[in-house]
Image: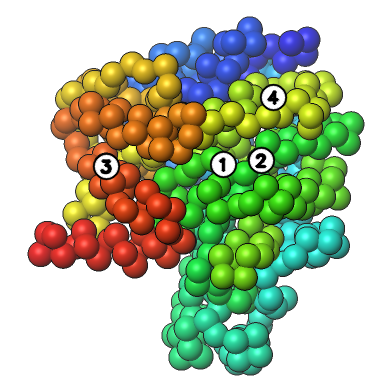
């Protein structure tokens, strides 16, 4: 790699470890930024250098752009990788990097801004000839929302224009639901995202959440790496992901991937990104949902079935290199499943369980990948997301991937804190999951009620 020689990693946890490993494989030095709570973390130990940028509270450390840029300049880092979450989709970070001659490892500020606004993104998708869910532009008040809801038909979903990560959404089955939630949701998203603007979309009950991974360079080249199925969700947060999706025919797969590429080409997208779709299982039709202009938590399932290291490709693209793959070079092999393991108590409403990990053991397996920042004795801080590991199992087909995941989780021992490992074991044995009879509501409507009843 010619130009990028030192990368500052503006993130923490497993994604920071993931980026460090990708950099090391490319001969790039790394600088880990840490809060006071993460001084003894695995990223701090693995990186060539670590810099403490502030106290534990994210607003005072990982979310402080000035401190991150100061750390990058002070360590002579010529690039910055934002990971996911925190500031990864804030165009201001990319802009400030550019002003300080720091290469932002991600898309352009314009890409981030235009796809971060959900209404702009819907217009871009429409202009690209991609179907969008019936819905509205900005709704000014609850009366207007009710009129639009009655026109397109209930149920509807009320969304924040600036929302993301599963936040800023409320389902309304009746006009009374809109009246009860409109003002509250607007205030919530104003506080969280700095923009209280809302809009409506038709809610599709029997839906799958399908997303297409794309890569784009600075020369107009765009390819896709097929799709992932992320339908198993709780409160719009993904729990388990797999690739490829079992619900798409080859013809639908080609159409949805072509649609994703069309959107990315229309904005001359640069870097790794994900185009998300809602797939109506009853009508067998897909609709554009949104775009994530960053690396995704679930990117490893795509890596496992394509053999492409997405983080390394981000580095090459940021280094102004043309894509190293053409579309004809991308071939799918086997099936991969990812389980997100959190330090949470499923029997207590998935309440976070920070604390010291006493035991952390698992069986090494060439067909199962572990992405984690944890180790025996590690203290999980209470200030951040509770994700402690991603387990990715690959098989020649879906059945073998499930079997390998089940065996791995049976031998994955964590003590000292409660985790979601037993919950995932239960999911993997459920007949609906095994037969692919799921949708985005299945986890909350079928699995969670039985979980609660078992412990009442």
When the figure is inspected, residue 213 is found, relative to residue 410, above or below; the finding is below
Q: Which image quadrant for residue 141? A: bottom right
Q: Which mark is residue 121?
A: none
Q: CA distance from mark 2 to mark 1?
A: 7 Å
Compare marks 3 and 1 and give the one earlier in the sequence: 1
Disc number lying in front (3 or 1): 1
Q: Quadrant of the C terminus?
A: bottom left
Q: CA distance from mark 2 to mark 4?
A: 16 Å
Judge whether residue 265 can be spotted in this image. yes
Q: Are marks 2 and 1 in contact (CB under 8 Å)?
A: yes
Query: From the viewer's perspective, is 225 left or right of 426?
Result: right
Instruction: Determine the secondary structure under disc 3.
Output: helix
Instruction: Determine the secondary structure under disc 4.
Output: helix
Q: CA distance from mark 4 to mark 1?
A: 21 Å
Crowd around label 3: few <14 · some 14–19 · many ≥20 (10 Å): some
Compare marks 2 and 3 and give the one earlier in the sequence: 2
Q: CA distance from mark 2 to mark 3?
A: 27 Å
Compare marks 2 and 4 and give the one earlier in the sequence: 2
When the figure is inspected, residue 172 is found, relative to residue 35, above or below; the finding is below
Residue 137 location, x and y as percent? Answer: 72, 76
Residue indicated by mark 2: 226
Instruction: Determine the secondary structure under disc 1.
Output: loop
Query: From the viewer's perspective, is 8 left or right of 404?
Result: right
Residue indicated by mark 3: 425
Rendered residue at 59%/66% (across/down) = 280
Instruction: Determine the secondary structure under disc 2.
Output: strand
Q: CA distance from mark 3 to mark 1?
A: 21 Å
Residue indicated by mark 4: 313
């Amino acid at each position: 790699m010619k130009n990028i020689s030192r990368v500052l990693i503006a993130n923490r946890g497993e994604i920071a470890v993931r980026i460090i490993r990708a950099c090391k494989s490319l001969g790039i030095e790394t600088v880990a930024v840490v809060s006071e709570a993460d001084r003894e973390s695995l990223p701090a130990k693995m990186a060539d250098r670590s810099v403490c940028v502030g106290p534990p509270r994210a607003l005072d450390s990982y979310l402080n752009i000035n401190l991150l840029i100061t750390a990058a300049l002070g360590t002579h880092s010529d690039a910055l990788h934002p990971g996911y979450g925190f500031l990864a989709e804030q165009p201001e970070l990319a802009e400030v990097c550019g002003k300080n001659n720091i290469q932002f490892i991600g898309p352009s500020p314009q890409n981030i801004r235009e796809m971060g606004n959900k209404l702009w993104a819907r217009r871009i998708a429409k202009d690209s000839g991609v179907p969008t869910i019936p819905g509205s532009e900005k709704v000014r008040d609850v009366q207007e929302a009710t009129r639009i809801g009655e026109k397109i038909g209930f149920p509807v979903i009320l969304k924040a224009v600036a929302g993301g990560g599963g936040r800023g959404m409320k389902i309304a089955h009746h006009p009374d639901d809109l009246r009860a939630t409109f003002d509250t949701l607007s205030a919530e998203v104003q506080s969280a995202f700095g923009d209280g603007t809302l809009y409506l979309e038709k809610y599709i009950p029997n839906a799958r959440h399908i997303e297409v991974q794309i890569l784009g360079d600075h020369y107009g080249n765009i390819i896709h790496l097929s799709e992932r199925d992320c339908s198993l969700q709780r409160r719009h947060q993904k729990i388990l992901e797999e690739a490829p999706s079992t619900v798409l025919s080859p013809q639908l797969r080609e159409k949805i991937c072509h649609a994703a590429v069309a959107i990315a080409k229309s904005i001359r997208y640069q870097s790794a990104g994900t185009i998300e779709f809602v797939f109506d299982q009853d009508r067998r039709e897909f609709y554009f949902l949104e775009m994530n202009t960053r690396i995704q938590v679930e990117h490893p399932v795509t890596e496992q079935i394509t053999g492409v290291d997405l983080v390394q490709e981000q580095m090459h693209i940021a280094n102004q290199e043309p894509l190293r793959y053409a579309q004809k070079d991308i071939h799918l092999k086997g099936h991969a499943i990812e389980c997100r393991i959190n330090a949470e108590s499923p029997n207590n409403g998935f309440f976070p369980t920070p604390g010291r990990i006493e035991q952390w053991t698992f069986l090494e397996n060439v067909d199962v990948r572990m992405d984690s920042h944890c180790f025996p004795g590690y203290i999980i801080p209470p200030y951040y997301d509770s994700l402690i590991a991603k387990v990715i199992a690959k098989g020649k087909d879906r059945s073998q991937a499930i079997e390998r995941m089940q065996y791995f989780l049976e031998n994955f021992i964590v003590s000292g804190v409660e985790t979601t490992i037993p919950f995932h074991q239960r999911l993997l044995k459920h007949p609906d999951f095994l037969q692919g009879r799921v949708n985005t509501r299945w986890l909350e409507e079928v699995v969670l009620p039985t979980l609660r009843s078992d412990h009442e």
